[in-house]
Image (cartoon, coloured by chain):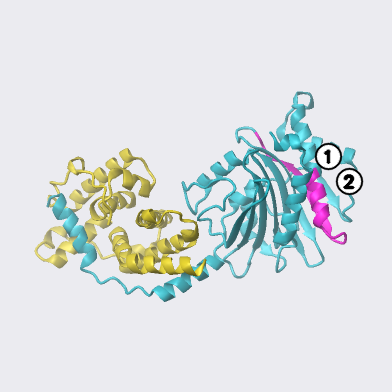
Chain colours: A cyan, B yellow
Amino acid sequence: MDETEFKDSLTRLVADESPYKTDVASSLRAFRAQNRRRRMTVAGASALIGMAAVAGGALALPALKPAPADRSNGALAASTESKTDTPPDTKPKTQTKFEDSAKTAIMNGIQSVSPPQWTLDLSDDISPREGRGWEGWHVAGTVDDGQGKSQLGVGVQVGSQKFRKELKLANPASPGSVFEPGTCPPDLGSTTCTATTQPDGRVLLVIRDVSPEVETRRVRNLVMLVDVEADVTIAAESENYASPDGKRAAPNKERAARATRAQPAYDSEMLTKLVMEVGRNIPPSLRAS
Amino acid sequence: MRAKDESDFAEFFAGRAASVQRAAYALCGDWHQAEDLTQTAFGQVYRAWPRIRSHDALNAYVHQTLVRTYLNERRRGRREIATARVPDRSLSTQAGSAVDDRLSLLAALDRVPPRQRACLVLRYLLDYSIEQTAEAVGCTASTVTSQTSRGLAALRGALGDVTASLTPMSRKDNHGRD
């Protein structure tokens, strides 16, 4: 048997059997159903806004009263030190400036869209910077609007473009696939994802993700405002679940989380307003960085 | 998905499903699993369809999805494969009829590791070049060469001297696709 014979043998191997009859209509119905059910693999999206380990000092805002600026800045500084193990006197001043201003912008954004009767239990978190090529400041925790705990996470990050390139490699749904910042990620199984370019050139990504597990039916609303040119991403997500202790579930524990309510406390419209408000409050120096 | 997109996809799916399923069968050796693989591959294409700018490379995309789905499933381990397999038979006694030839080849392919088998199917059934195979499998061209060589060696081991004349390096690149 030479190569030609081997090729012929392979051809006969698949041709002599009768392929099943393709029912296009029923297959299309199945594809549509899969599309609706499929859970977006947003380990990446969750990590995008960098709330993997919420280890900072808790900022309890039961009545949504804004914390005094000096107190919040102090909490931020303490959190930063504990996470990075960097002596305060060696910490770059610009980095502290970024963290403070971004954190203030995030808190203002959350308060601008959250009704005053809601209870927020939020923590601040610093994403590790070393070796990642991106940095960010994040606020995450749970929100209770009287209908059950709902997760909330809001983040500002610089270097998102590079980070998203890392994400694509980690995406098991499409290993090695390429997608550009400011576009809907391909092959993530996103139930819905829309990308809208704003008049100022930034791109608004609105994503809604519903898990396939009927018994848990985790729902995630995620909105990202991406400034590709400045490499700044503002992201906000809200989920209809929380970890058993009522806190925000770590991304690697999310599959075990049970839905605590039908829908996330913040819908896409609220999250869009939130990221827009955060974007307005970010200093121009950061946007231009 | 818009009606126009769905209509285009349905036309593509109807026209390509049988061919893709045959390739899937060559990969897994089981028509039922081939059907599953085909559905999974086209399901992923369906999701990506509105974002696909160039439909010229659709065949390559479907085959890439098919191969990677197959490799992922093999990596995870599908126990039903083991129970559904045709029991090993003495290959030397099966020559002489077309049916036995098919069974021999199928049994031999079953002994080839999944990645090597994928390279063989892409190279010899779908006429992919080394570079095209590398893109579909997600590895380098040199890996394809070595995997193909090892795959053929595994086939030789299973089929005895029947495929002894196969030499991967003598195969000319064929850039055509089905």
Earlier sequence position, callout 2 versus callout 1 = 2
* Residue drawn at x 48%, y 52% as measured from the top left: A174
Q: In the depicted view, which residue is nearer to us: A110 or B71?
A: A110
| Quadrant in the rendering for residue A124 | top right
Q: Which label sits on residue A67?
A: 2
The image shows residue A43 at horizontal and vertical percentages of: 59, 51
* Residue drawn at x 67%, y 59% as measured from the top left: A221
- Identify the amino acid type marked 2: Ala
**Category of crowding for the residue at label 2, using alpha-carbon neighbours closer than 10 angstroms: few (below 14), some (14–19), many (at least 20):** some
Magenta span has A115? yes
Residue under pointer 1: A75
Q: In the depicted view, which residue is nearer to us: A227 or B107?
A: A227
Question: Could you tell me how far apart the alpha carbons at marks 2 and 1 are, in whole angstroms?
Answer: 10 Å
The image shows residue A87 at horizontal and vertical percentages of: 76, 26
User: Which residue is outermost to the top?
Assistant: A90
The answer to whether residue A245 shows anywhere in this view is no
* Residue drawn at x 89%, y 38% as measured from the top left: A70
Q: Point out the stretch of residues depicted in magenta.
A: A105-129
Subunit bearing disc 1? A
Q: Are marks 2 and 1 on the same chain?
A: yes
For residue B73, side relative to residue A260 (left or right):
left
